[in-house]
Image (cartoon, rainbow, N blue to C red):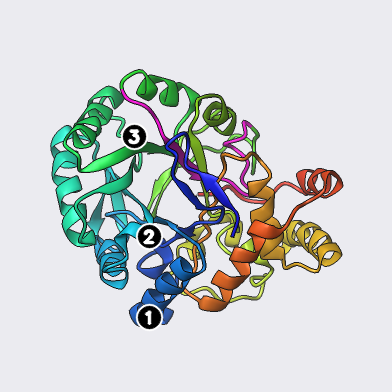
Amino acid sequence: MRTREVGTTGHQVGAVGLGCMGMSWAYAQSSRDDAESAEVLRQAVDAGVTFLDTSDVYGAGHNEILLGEALAGRRDEIFLATKAGLVVTDMQTRAIARNGSPEHLRAAIDASLKRLGTDHIDLWYLHRIDDQVPLVESWGAMAEAVQAGKVRYLGLSEVTVAQCTAAAAVHPVTAVQSELSLWTRDALGHSSGAAGSEPVVTTMSIGGAPESGDVVGWCAANGAAFVPFSPLGRGFLTGAIDATTELESTDLRAGNPRFTPEARAANARIVDAVRAVADRHGATPAQVAIAWTLAQGPHVIPIPGTRRLRHLVDNIGAADLDLTKADLAELDNAPKPVGTRY
C-alpha cells in the first residue's frame, strides 16, 4: 500500500488507516464478534494498514483491550492512536459526557496504557474539548504525558481552527481528527447538511465544533496530519444502505437525522454520484468515497472503520485509486445531504 507521513513526525503509515470503534461500540451489537474483529486487525497489519485508531470510550475500554490482545507482540509494526476526554455515563444507553480535567486525563493515559498492553501511545488525542475546562489546561496535562515518555505525539478531535491555534501555542499539534466525507465537509470550511443546525449532545454521540473553519487547510499549513473519520458516511456512501434497510435500535444510525427512511431516500442521489465515478474506474463506491478524502491533500489519512475482512480489502483498494480532476469536480458537486450529521 502507498504510505503517508503522520504530520512531520517522520513516521510513514499506510495511506488508509483503520478506525476500530465499530468493533466494540455504536453499531449493531447483534453482529459483534470479537474473534472476527481480532482477525481483521491482524489481517489489516499484514496488508500494510499500520495506522490504527481507538479510544478509551469505545465500549468503556473494551476496544483498547481488544486491540491490545489481538496485536500482542506486534506493537512495533503499528502506529497506535487512542483518545481521552470522553467518559461513559450510562453503558446501557451508551450516553457519554466530556471530561477534560487534568486529573481525569492523567488517570486516563495510565489506564489506556494498561488496557493496550504497551508502554507508550504514538498519538494521543483530546477526544473533545470540555467547555468547562480551559483548553490550555487539558492540553498542558496531555503534554505532561509526552514529557513523561508515555505518549509521543498529541492530537485534537472535532475542533475549530481557533482551537488548533490555541493548542499549538502550548504544545505541537501533530494531528487533527474530524468527520470528513462527501456528505460532511465542515472541516474544509464548507457547510454540509441543513442550514441553521448545530451539533448537539445526544445518546451515543457527541457533536463537534460548529463553524470549524478550514481545519484541513490549517493542518497542511502547520505540519499536522488531518485524519478523517467516517469517510464512508457511516456506511451510507458504500451504497449498502437504502431507505428500506432495517437498523437495530442499538445502532447509532437509528437515531441519526441522515438515516431516517425519508432522508436515506433523498440522500441516494449522493450515492448515485459516487457510483457513477466508481463505474468509470471499475472501482467500488467505498473506494471512490475514501479516495476523495485522500485527494484533499497528501497530509490526509482516512480511517474507515470495519469489522469485516471483505470490507477491509475493499477499503484498502482506495489507496491505489487516482481520481482525475474531472472526477473530483463531479464529486465536489454532488448533492448536499438531507439531515444534520448529529
Q: Taking the image as drawn, is residue 327 in sight?
A: yes
Between 137 and 8, the one lying in front of the other is 8
**Horizontal and vertical percent for residue 76?**
33, 58
Between the C-alphas of marks 3 and 1, the distance is 32 Å
Q: For mark 2, give the secondary structure.
A: helix
For label 2, the crowd category at 10 Å Cα-Cα, with few meaning under 14, some 14 to 19 and many 20 or more, is some
Q: Report x, y in % for residue 240.
A: 65, 72
Q: Which residue is mark 2?
A: 77
Quarter assignment of residue 56? bottom left
Tag nearer the camera, 2 or 1 = 2
Q: Looking at the picture, which amino acid does disc 1 mark?
A: Asp
Residue 99 against residue 73 in the figure, above or below: above
Q: Which residue is mark 1?
A: 33
Of residues 242 and 310, the one drawn nearer to the viewer in this rendering: 310
Residue ID for mark 3:
129
Residue 309, how many percent across, how many down?
52, 77
**Along the polypeptide, which appears first: circle 2 or circle 1?**
1
Q: Which of pointers 2 and 3 lies earlier in the amino acid sequence?
A: 2
